[in-house]
Amino acid sequence: MPFGIKNAPSHLQIMMNEIFPEELSKGWLIIYINDIIVCSKTWEEHMYRFSRGLTKVQSVNMKISLKKFPFGFKELKALGNVVFGLSLGIEKNKVAEVLLKPMPLNKMGIQSFLGFAGYYRQHIKDFASIARPLYKLCDKETVFEMTVDRVKAFESLRESLTTAPLLLMLYFKLPSKLYIDASGDGLGAALHQVQIMNDKPVE
């Protein structure tokens, strides 16, 4: 597929999904455009699944770049995230880039920051409430001015990104607890599960 075609990524994603339908349906293979991730619990299982995936790749004359080919790792960096077992964290290099940048001086800068922070919103508790002053600042009718509450929101989000907790995936074979609460502002619920790191919320 040639470079530069606007719809190339979506067409490539569809093509990849059509090549690996069974593997995708079973959940042990993940594809994002031209990135393929094979997930396994044991080394033997991993070798079998890897061999099976490689056979499919060869059957359609696809090529794999060995320079971009980490194999057999327990920890994996993908799409700005760090995946380790059942946990999901933020890639620290991505956060470091934001910390090195000065406070935005215009709406475009705020929108760019919100886009980055919003990508990791599941790691930030009360993201919508914290970011509300900055989102209001992006309105067309609003004059750009970094007021105290907006600066506070910016710094709070930036701090939250550096201290973001690991998110744990739900493991159905382990016991779970459902906590619920309500207040005048709304309803809330949290699903907790006893895993390696004790009783933790599952996102």
Image: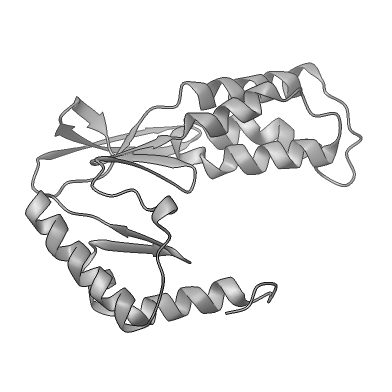
Q: Horizontal and vertical percent for residue 7?
A: 63, 77
- Above-or-below relation of 77 to 148: below
Residue at figure coordinates x 35%, y 31% from the top left? 166
Q: Is residue 60 left or right of residue 108?
A: left
Q: Quadrant of residue 39?
A: bottom left
Residue 190 shows up from this direction: yes
Q: Position of residue 52 (x, y in %)?
A: 19, 71
Residue at the image position 28 percent from the left and 63 percent from the top: 29
Q: Taking 158 as reference, is 61 left or right? A: left
Q: Residue placed farthest to the front in the image?
A: 66
Quarter of the image that includes the N terminus: bottom right
Q: Is residue 183 above or below residue 56?
A: above
Q: Nearer the viewer, residue 185 or 29?
A: 29
Residue at horizontal 51 percent and vertical 22 percent from the top: 162
Quarter of image, res 19: bottom left
The total of numbered circles placed on residues is: 0
Residue 138 appears left or right of 61: right
Q: Which image quarter holds the C terminus? A: top left
Percent from the top left, x then y, of residue 64?
A: 40, 65
Viewer-side residue, 12 vs 198:
12
Q: Is residue 20 visible?
A: no
- In the displayed structure image, the side of residue 202 where residue 44 appears, left or right: left
Q: Which is nearer the eye, 88 or 100?
A: 100
